[in-house]
Amino acid sequence: MTAEESRRYRVLLVDDDPGLLRLLTIRLKTEGYDVAACESAAQAQASVPRFRPDVVVSDLRMAEQDGIELLKSLQRRYPALPVILMTAHGTIPDAVEATQSGAFAFLTKPIERQELLEKINRALKVSGFVAAGENWRARIHTRSHVMEERLSQALVASGADAPVLLVGQPGTGKSQLAHAIHVASARRNDAFVELDLAVADAISVEQAIENYRQGQGGPEAGAATIGTVYLPEVGALSMPAQSHLANFLAGGAGAQPGGGRPLALIAATTRNLQQLIAKSQFREDLYYALSTTRIDLPPLSQRREDIPLLAAFFLDELASRNDDRRVLAPESLELLMTAEWPGNIRELQSLLTHAVASANSPVISPDVIQRLLGGAATRLPSFAEAREEFTRNYLVQLLQISRGNVTQAAKLAARNRTDFYKLLAKYDLSPESFKT
């Protein structure tokens, strides 16, 4: 049995009545569901990215934010997630408002056990979350709030046919996210095809796809039905290739042989396309056509909390391939957590591969990591050190703006002249040096 088949369906309950929450939780857990209970819409919105429910059952009447507002918020971020609304006020206007807002179903309190189960079972049959299961994001390891937001955007994008633009530094995981969007979509059973048009120069997307279908696109080429086309670096396309791509998108991109579902297009870039547009090196119309949904991936330095997860994953991968399990010493992990990582996740993976090969014991020592990092390892400043550095930089900026005029600088800082002079003396700053 696969992980997806063994995964229990998940129901998120939302109600400001703790007693009803407990009752419904017991009922659903008895039926074999995983249940998360929230007492407010705000709690529910925070829980969805972590719990990833297959269906939401929410009260209609709640303080601060009601069920309709919660429904609309969830629809924007998770269009494939069905929401069932319930209320003690079983009036026709309530039911009409709920269904017109896009609720999957409407329940009237007191909630009948059989009716609740029937409507949840019906919702599960159309839930995009059920179809995608947990596997859609299986290779993306994160506990970062920023990355969870990006994954929420990706899940929304997977339910649409519009192009997606992934932007991020080299090694941030754009290819993995593109594949995750494909797996989460209704096209998951069709082929995911990477086409590097920058290498093909002025070749059209249509010709590249046809070459793939004829078996010229690599070891997996030859699929008749393509689900998603991934373009790994659109910022490097020549102007003729950009024209081909713009025409492809303008002409209703992605027709399939036999009239099947149109293919999806995901583009990625490490470059600043707006700067390229300003230099007349990238077509503005193509940029807007590609970025119907734009997802910016953060560098690893902005999601350091993910480094232990990623390190553990890469070490497990290496152990399964080499039958040689290694672990990081705590000090080694600290070094990884404070390194700069200009090459991002890809650099971390490469370093750990070399570390496993270099280590002469089951525990990877900090000496090994330090040697491989070279000058890349840095110590994060303490809070006090960071505050001191900020204060000095702030004073320098004030003196630069005022050109050494202490009265003006003190006024900008909302401090009196005496206190301001004391600060300048503390940080060894001379106003005279800023007067020229």
Image: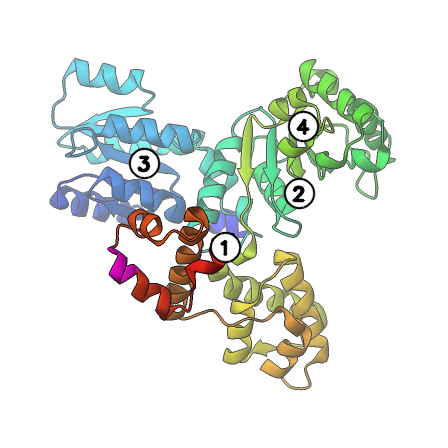
- At numbered mark 1, what does the secondary structure look like: helix, strand or loop? helix
202 or 91, which is in the foreground?
202
Q: Position of residue 169 (x, y in %)?
A: 63, 48
Query: Label 3: which residue?
Result: 56
- At numbered mark 3, what does the secondary structure look like: helix, strand or loop? strand
The three-letter code of the residue at mark 2 reads: Thr
Q: Position of residue 250 (x, y in %)?
A: 68, 15
289 or 107, which is in the foreground?
289
The three-letter code of the residue at mark 1 reads: Gln
Query: Label 2: which residue?
Result: 270
Mark nearer the viewer, 3 or 1: 1
The three-letter code of the residue at mark 4 reads: Ile
- At numbered mark 4, what does the secondary structure look like: helix, strand or loop? helix
Mark nearer the viewer, 2 or 4: 4
Instruction: Tell which circle, 1 or 4, labels the residue nearer the N-terminal end.
Output: 4
Whether residue 421 is situated above or below residue 249 in the rendered picture? below
Q: Quadrant of residue 390?
A: bottom left
Confirm whether the magenta stretch covers residue 109: no
Task: Name the residue: 60% across, 23% down.
Answer: 288
Q: Which mark is residue 277?
A: 4
Instruction: Tell which circle, 3 or 4, labels the residue nearer the N-terminal end.
Output: 3
Count neighbours of disc 1 (C-alpha within 10 A) and say few if under 14, some if 14 to 19, many if 20 or more: few
Q: Position of residue 228 (x, y in %)?
A: 67, 32
Q: Position of residue 244 (x, y in %)?
A: 78, 21
